[in-house]
Amino acid sequence: MTDRIQEFLRSRTEDGPCLVLDLDVVRDNYNAFSKALPDTRVFYAVKANPDPQVLELLAGLGSCFDTASVVEIQQVLAAGASADRISFGNTIKKERDIARAYALGVRLFAVDCEAEVEKIARVAPGSRVFCRILCNGEGAEWPLSRKFGCAPELAARVLEHAHRLGLQAYGLSFHVGSQQRNPLMWDSALRSSAEIFRDLAERGIVLQMVNLGGGFPTKYLRDVPAVKAYGEAIFNSLRKHFGNKIPETIIEPGRGMVGNAGIIEAEVVLISKKADDDKVKWVYLDIGKFNGLAETMDEMIRYPIKTAFDGDTLEPCVLAGPTCDSVDVLYEKDPYMLPVSLEIGSKVLIEGTGAYTTMYSSVGFNGFPPLKSYVI
Ligand SMILES: *Cc1c(COP(=O)(O)O)cnc(C)c1O
């Protein structure tokens, strides 16, 4: 909680939950990434929080941007970054959208199969492509499964295909899973990357870039290593696997750039018990899975929650959202410890909510409006 956020919330009179995001924290995060990985370009993953003020700040600081759709590309351009600072990093793109991105000046695209390479070759000739390789997501609190990327054995073939079709086979990418708490998890993907670099070099294709993806964590309830530790571990792995031929590198932090910059203020709507002998209380907030806290899915992300009663005795509570959908329960398998003195109408502060909240909020499910956001 920063002083600026505290001050803002003190003067706020509007009803309903809201996110307040402090740009000073985003600036500090950007600088910490630049310092921890001085030879690596930062491509902010826009989807984490595409607020225009966040994009403008980062554009002004010199950041590049990882985008997933034409709308995100337009948002980045509107924020003042030129198209050569944009990567179209989604591996799943309509050919029409690739053409639109190309018309807007974008020349850097992600692929993970030959069919996607063919689309790019048709409508974005001569562009740079990087192939995403699978990562198992081990050690991540929000793993990305097998949806994106191909087996390392396939990547060389995909990039060779790109080369043959007149594209620039530019490099490789991977994502070690979001909220990755282990800085050593980049190592095996970098080992595979180095093998693919060597393999393709033997066939006369010289790759230049490794996209190290996102995964840099935000502190929720548990401590996480500092960005510096990630920078060191990644540099050591690059040295180990690439020797003195370290390629150009980029990172795509989303959560790590904005997560800790935001706080959600919400309100307790109801506290009840389901039976006299129930050991846990049910606490219902005016925010839930559908208006900002989607990442509580499977109780994966556990946010720190502050109340005015911190320091009082705690008791286990099931924490739930306000909608009439029974999946709108935040923490039940592992109940959340909250002060016994918490009351209906009490405000709660949900920390570390600057990433993956506003944009995951439904447009009006059950009549609840999308999460309000104030960037200060
Ligand atoms: C979502 C995403 C990111 C950001 O991941 P974080 O774990 O939030 O840093 C980076 N790169 C790509 C391709 C993504 O899809």
Image: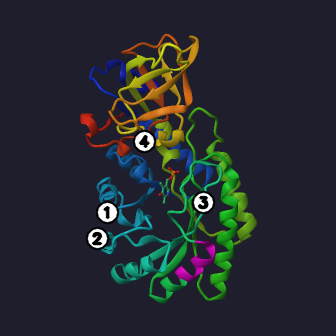
Q: Main secondary structure of the magenta part?
A: helix
Give the foreground label among 1 and 4: 4
- Return the disc, 1 or 4, that comes first in the chain's sequence: 1
Give the SS element for disc 1: helix
**Whether label 1 touches label 2, CB < 8 Å:** yes
Residue 376 in picture, x, y percent from top left: 36, 33
Amino acid at dot 2? Arg
Ligand 1 contact, mark 3 (Cβ < 8 Å):
no
Label 1 or label 3, whichever comes before in sequence order: 3
Residue identifier under label 2: 100
Q: Earlier in the sequence, mark 4 or mark 2?
A: 2
Task: Using a 10 Å C-alpha cutoff, classify the residue at mark 3 as few (fewer than 14 neighbours), some (14 to 19) or many (20 or more).
Answer: few
Eye-nearest disc, 2 or 3: 2
Pinpoint residue 285: horizontal percent, then vertical percent. Answer: 39, 25
Q: Tell me: is circle 4 under 8 Å from ligand 1.
A: no
Disc 2 + disc 3, Cβ < 8 Å: no
| Amino acid type shown at disc 1 | Val
- Magenta residues span 151-159
Tell me if mark 2 has few (under 14), some (14-19) or many (20+) residues whose alpha carbon lies within 10 angstroms of its own.
some
Residue carrying label 4: 294
Q: Name the one closer to the observer, 268 or 372.
A: 268
Q: CA distance from mark 1 to mark 3?
A: 29 Å
How is this picture coloured? rainbow
Determine which residue is flagged by label 3: 39
